[in-house]
């Protein structure tokens, strides 16, 4: 670890006042838990939770060819986005591995707003700039935003009290700019929990004010502040990828079971050629979910065996509080990466039985 | 908070010696630092534990932590309660949620462990 001081979000003092346990998360001083991971996890599944995700980065692309540049550096089809709509996408290297996984929001034809992972934001910015042969401008705007995620079945009822914007009119993966808690905000119907919810972007100087208003509005629903611990168990149950775990520079979206964000027929984009080749020659490995059957918890990085021989590794694993099971995701040879295979996860030098299963592990009732 | 008749390690285990037998557990500070405990891995009865070597592990939602043997000896009993109710470790780490009992093979080892007052100071300084 470097000795550089940890970066802080505008809500750092709020977390400390709440008695959160703070950890170094990719160079950021972030809350991992407040009341407890399971308690926070359950609050989101059953009612509503609030997360400070201000560490996430923002990159904006402007100009007459903003759409062209955005489309060229991402895997999903930007032309399909309508004004006010967002989608999940990948930034790839030429060799097809991930630079990052991101959300692309279309503000208008000349302006795209990208939400990117905190620890990748510098390289994302450089990567996009390095491919900018278009009439477009790339701005690194992370310092202009704080981001607060409000997730759970009571998220909308909580937030609706604070804004004249009709939140029922914002469809899933759409967003609206408007007044929120008396300040200008971007309200996106997005999230990383597998639950219904919103992500609210405001200026950093309003973060403490807005957090306080949301906590007050959510009091009747028992809103709980939630840390990175619950964020991780929630996203794992919903099988949402985490950079550095399911995906990284050595993994392609096809391997990561993210073929749905790759639109090979949309035209040229960075990494396309490598993906086409990979598709033609066939994948060698693929991501698949598993459940532990024996006693033990498969954790990130543990080896996976098939018939007693090493065959892959766990990308993310742990207890699933909603399901009361120990679950995980792992890479296996592609022909084995299907539900119903008996595997062993090596837990402290001991192979423990597990079985591959359908994903997502958890899907909310609609 | 920390029982006077226990001795403590820097790795946050406690040991209660009664004659030639000892009961071992993790401290309240340890369970608090770990958070929600979801799995406890213990040695088998008859296993020989060596002071300072891994005794087993305690897993929270987030992570796995090794537990080290504060003293050497042979395991005579493990706490079956923890297999089905690992969360008891969060509730009663100094009582019902002990980990193992053993017969001491080197009783003098206990003398090097911290007293309750020393441990209190130690965790106070760590925070």
Image (spheres, coloured by chain):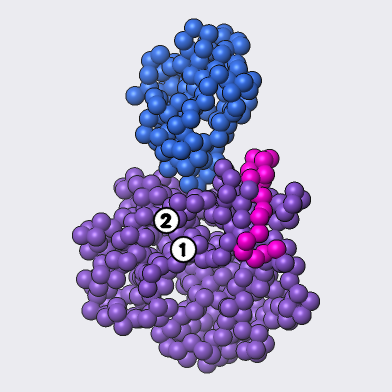
**In front of the other: A41 or B116:** A41
Please report the bounds of the magenta region as a residue range. Answer: A336-352
Question: Which residue is at the far right?
Answer: A281
Tag 2–tag 1 contact (CB < 8 Å): yes
Which color is chain A depicted in?
purple
Q: Which residue is mark 2?
A: A322
Q: Residue A362, which numbered label?
A: 1
Q: How crowded is the residue under tag 2: few (<14 C-alpha within 10 Å), some, or many (20+)? A: some
Chain letter of the residue beneath label 1 in the structure image:
A
Q: Is there any visible trace of residue A321 in the rendered image?
A: yes
**In front of the other: B1 or A68:** B1
**In front of the other: B69 or B103:** B103
Classify residue A306 by image quadrant: bottom right
Chain letter of the residue beneath label 2 in the structure image:
A
Between discs 2 and 1, the one toward the N terminus? 2
Q: CA distance from mark 2 to mark 1?
A: 8 Å
Classify residue A202 by image quadrant: bottom left
Percent coordinates x, y for residue B117 in the rendering = 39, 18
What quarter of the picture does the C terminus of chain B occupy? top left
Which color is chain B depicted in?
blue
């Amino acid at each position: 670890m470097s000795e550089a001081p940890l970066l802080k979000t505008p809500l750092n003092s709020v977390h400390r006042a709440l008695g959160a346990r703070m950890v170094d998360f990719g160079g950021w001083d972030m809350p991992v838990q407040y009341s407890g991971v399971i308690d926070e996890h359950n609050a989101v599944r059953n009612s509503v939770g609030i997360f400070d995700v201000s560490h996430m980065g923002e990159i904006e692309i402007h100009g007459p060819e903003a759409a062209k540049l955005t489309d060229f550096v991402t895997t999903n089809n930007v032309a399909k986005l309508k004004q006010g709509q967002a989608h999940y996408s990948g930034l790839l290297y030429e060799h097809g591995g991930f630079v990052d996984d991101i959300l692309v929001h279309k503000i208008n034809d000349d302006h795209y707003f990208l939400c990117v992972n905190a620890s990748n934001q510098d390289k994302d910015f450089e990567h996009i700039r390095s491919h900018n042969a278009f009439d477009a401008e790339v701005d690194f705007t992370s310092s202009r935003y704080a981001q607060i995620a409000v997730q759970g079945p009571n998220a909308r009822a909580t937030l609706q009290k604070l804004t004249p914007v009709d939140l029922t009119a914002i469809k899933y993966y759409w967003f609206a700019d408007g007044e929120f808690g008396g300040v200008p905000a971007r309200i996106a119907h997005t999230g990383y929990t597998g639950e219904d919810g919103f992500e609210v972007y405001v200026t950093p100087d309003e973060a403490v004010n807005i957090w306080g208003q949301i906590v007050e509005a959510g009091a009747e629903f028992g809103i709980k502040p939630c840390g990175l611990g619950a964020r991780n168990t929630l996203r794992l149950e919903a099988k949402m990828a985490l950079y550095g775990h399911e995906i990284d520079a050595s993994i392609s979206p096809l391997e990561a079971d993210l073929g749905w964000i790759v639109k090979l027929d949309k035209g040229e984009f960075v990494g396309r050629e490598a993906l086409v080749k990979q598709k033609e020659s066939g994948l060698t490995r693929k991501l698949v979910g598993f459940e532990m059957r024996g006693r033990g918890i498969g954790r990130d990085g543990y080896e996976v065996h098939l018939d007693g021989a090493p065959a892959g590794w766990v990308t993310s694993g742990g207890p699933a509080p909603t399901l009361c099971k120990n679950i995980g995701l792992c890479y296996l040879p592609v022909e084995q990466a299907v539900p119903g295979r008996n595997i062993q996860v090596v837990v402290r030098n001991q192979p423990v039985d597990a079985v591959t299963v359908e994903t997502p592990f958890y899907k909310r009732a609609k | 908070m920390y029982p006077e008749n226990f001795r403590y390690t820097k790795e946050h285990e406690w040991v209660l010696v009664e004659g030639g037998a000892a009961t071992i557990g993790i401290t309240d500070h340890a369970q608090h630092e770990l958070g929600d405990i979801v799995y406890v891995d213990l040695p088998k009865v008859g296993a020989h534990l060596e002071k300072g070597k891994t005794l087993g592990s305690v897993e929270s939602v987030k992570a796995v932590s090794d537990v080290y043997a504060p003293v050497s000896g042979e395991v005579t009993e493990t706490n079956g309660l923890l297999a089905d109710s690992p969360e008891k470790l969060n509730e009663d780490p100094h009582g019902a949620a002990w980990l193992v009992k053993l017969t001491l093979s080197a009783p003098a080892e206990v003398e090097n462990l911290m007293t309750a007052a020393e441990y209190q100071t130690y965790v106070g300084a760590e925070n």
